[in-house]
Image (cartoon, rainbow, N blue to C red):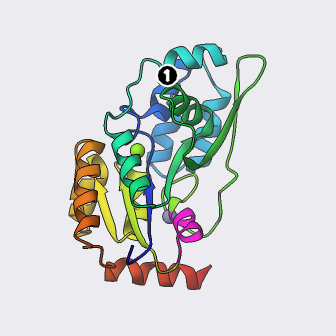
Amino acid sequence: MLYQCHIFCDFDGTISGQDIGWELFQRFGQHEPWNAQMIAGILPVREYWQKMAQHLTQPITHELLGDFLRTIPIDAGFQSLLAVARNHSIPFTIVSDGFDLYIHRFLELHGITEVEIFCNHAELTPDGGMTVSFPHATEGCECFTATCKRNVLLRLAHPDARIIYIGDGISDHCPAEHADIVFAKGKLAAWCNANRIPHYPFSGLENVALQLSKILERRRLRPRHQAALQRKSAWERE
Ligand SMILES: [Mg+2]
Ligand SMILES: [Zn+2]
């Protein structure tokens, strides 16, 4: 390979067919009033998750969690995307502002165990409750997340690596700004359009796998100047 690359991929709504972080509290708890408070900027994102975890309306067990996760599909192209990364010896990291509790379990249900994951922590308590914590949180960024994914990118990627980012939501804005190649759908695609971040729109990961193999075969992976500048200034501030 002529250059190093690193693929970072969002989980909720990108790998999973639905936003499990949202659906989980829809099923076992409630979002309001905290969601409205968070959107209004009154409640920080970490406290939003804490409030919801503290106020479940139904007890949750590992068994119920498994039943719930089996109702949610996985993107049919995820295995193809992992294969592209493997075939080109490109490191692949899942970065999520959601929780290990359901991410590990969901991937396991689909036979995927070998992927590196950076996310927040949640565990079930014996009485059917849930606690959450944020082991990767740093104070380095003001973006609208519990744990900034950008910091994971900057920490893990080789300084000369081309960063490839795949995502669909608000927590993907910050890492996409720092990536050389962006694959975007949903809210992330709209935000990229509004902010003139060049990106490949996609509807499913099969598209991403195909497009990415073409890019890698044609060796068209140039650094994106604006992203390189953003990374440099973030590194300098750390
Ligand atoms: Mg997402
Ligand atoms: Zn950030």
Judge by depth and name the residue closer to the eye, 128 or 88: 88
Ligand 1 quarter of the rendering: top left
Q: Residue 60: x percent and y percent? A: 64, 17
Residue 212 screen position, x and y as percent: 28, 58
Asked if disc 1 is less than 8 Å from ligand 1, the answer is: no
Q: Residue 230's spot in the image, x, y percent?
A: 43, 79
Q: How many marks?
A: 1
* Quadrant of residue 62 within the rendered picture: top right
Q: Quadrant of the N terminus?
A: bottom left
Eyeballing the image, is 171 above or below 219?
above
Say if the magenta span includes residue 154.
yes
Q: Residue at x 39, y 47 (%)?
A: 83
Span of residues in magenta: 150-158
Q: Residue at x 52, y 65 (%)?
A: 153
Q: Quick one: 122 or 55, which is closer to the camera?
A: 122
Question: What secondary structure predominates along the stretch shown in magenta?
Answer: helix
Q: Is residue 85 above or below residue 198?
A: above
In the structure shown, which secondary structural element does the residue marked by tag 1 occupy?
helix
Task: Classify 10 Å Cα crowding around label 1: few (below 14), some (14-19), many (20 and above).
Answer: many
- Taking the image as shown, residue 132 lies to the left or right of residue 114, namely right
Q: Is residue 43 visible?
A: no
- Image point 53% across, 50% down: which residue? 42
Residue for badge 1: 69
Task: Locate the C terminus and report the quarter of the image it occupies.
Answer: bottom right
